[in-house]
Amino acid sequence: MKLKKTAVALACAIASCVVLPLAACAGNTAEPCEHSYLSFMISEPTCTGKGLIEQTCEKCGEKIYSDIEALGHDFVDGTCTRCGISDGTAEEPGPLCEHDFVGSVVVLPSCTEKGRMEFECEKCGEKIYSDIEALGHDFVNGTCTRCGISDGTAEEPDLSLFTDMYDAYVLAKELGYPFTEETFTEDLPGMRFTDIFVNKNGRFKVKYGWISADIGDVRVDIPVEEEPELRGSIAAIEVTGDGDVQMTDTTGVVKNFGRIEQYATITRETLTGVALNMQNCLLLLTSRGRIINAGQVLQNNSPDVSDDLLLYGELNDGTYQVCGAFDRNIKSADIAPTHMGARVVSVGIEAFSGYACLENVTVPEGVTHIKQCAFKDCTALKYAILPQSLESLHLLAFENCRSLKSIFYMGTEEQWKNVTENSNYFLKDVAVYYYGADWELSDGKPIII
């Protein structure tokens, strides 16, 4: 099924080279760059406050910053045409604004470079700017905890901590995906990963198309001395048809970091592995042993994002359906009621079909549909907890679940009959228990009363 195949490719990509978000590559040149700068205005000048210009070299990506002098007031009939302030000569001067400034960071400071704060008056809109001093390095055990630079006393990084494509294939086989190595990688080119972030538990999460995946805790302690190639947080990672890895940051900058080794057609430096360090920087390892810092992955502390290693697909209305598990050998599936901040409303077609080790499943309140063959051939499945919110249960949802003995339903017998009016064939030998009358929950497990 295409959905499963995509989810596998996603798992692979991320556990390995498509976890590519974990790297950066710029490439050092022997010749000094003949810079060709493009200019972008980060903040506009006001009558009294300076603006800020960012210039980025199209060739090497170097950035420089320069101030734009304040414009000065343009008084006409005693009133500035730009900000409205009076010079005191107007016929009926109004009261001066009692400013109420709200500050925001427009340029983040780094260990070695200043940042910039913008303060805007909520009443009149006047803006003023101030610098944020560079943070300075914070060395712990020879490595800066902020940017990863070494003070010369740190040990050499362990390059074996990087994950490569073959590692990802081995992991996929361990997780129960029955594909050859060729099948495993064939759908990788053309993938574009978005919603890339590390949650409060240190888990790396990505989204591909309408499938979301929790890839697990992949962080390793690998310091990097160079500044990140991308200035903003990494917003998307794309693998082109030729196997090139491109990343886009939150400022809109796109960079090509090189070609995955498996797709190289000529002898040159290629990307052989990826990792995510303790500062949430995506790191790429090249065939020459060089570590490239692509940039930081966004950190998200939302409690709504589940850590159950299940795969969820986004529906047209923004809700989600569960599509299966990252690990096909799971024994228990506890489906989350929400994912990425939105409701989970269904169990998808063939979502857990063929999960031979699955022994129990809990479907939460809010799920309204369990679709065709959702749990087909789950031969070890012993019981399922189903919600009162369920509106339809497909006839073939539990086909060939020969170990299934009990269904613990959160509603009443009358409600169950309405749900299963036309879908009871494969449940005719299964005992159904009704919440409150026949059973209750204890530590998440059903207890018959």
Image: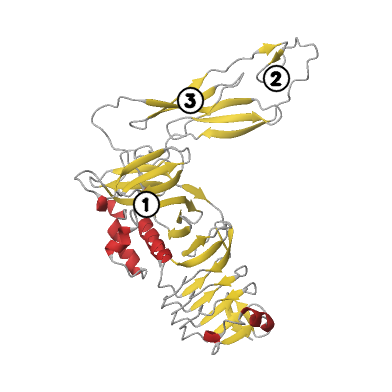
Seen in the picture, residue 320 relative to 414 is either above or below; the reply is: above
Q: Is residue 22 above or below residue 387?
A: above
- The amino acid type of the residue labelled 1 equals Gly
Foreground residue, 391 or 154? 391
Q: Amino acid at mark 2?
A: Gly
Dot 2 or dot 1, earlier in sequence: 2
The answer, for residue 144, to whether it is visible in the render is: no
State if disc 2 and disc 3 touch (CB < 8 Å): no
Q: Earlier in the sequence, mark 1 or mark 3?
A: 3
Reading the image, the residue beneath label 1 is: 190
- Residue 85 position, x and y percent, is 70, 18
Q: Nearer the viewer, residue 430 or 19?
A: 430
The residue at 37%/68% (across/down) is 175
**Which residue is denoted by mark 2 in the rendering?**
84
Q: Is residue 215 above or below residue 22?
A: below
Read off the residue under disc 3. 53
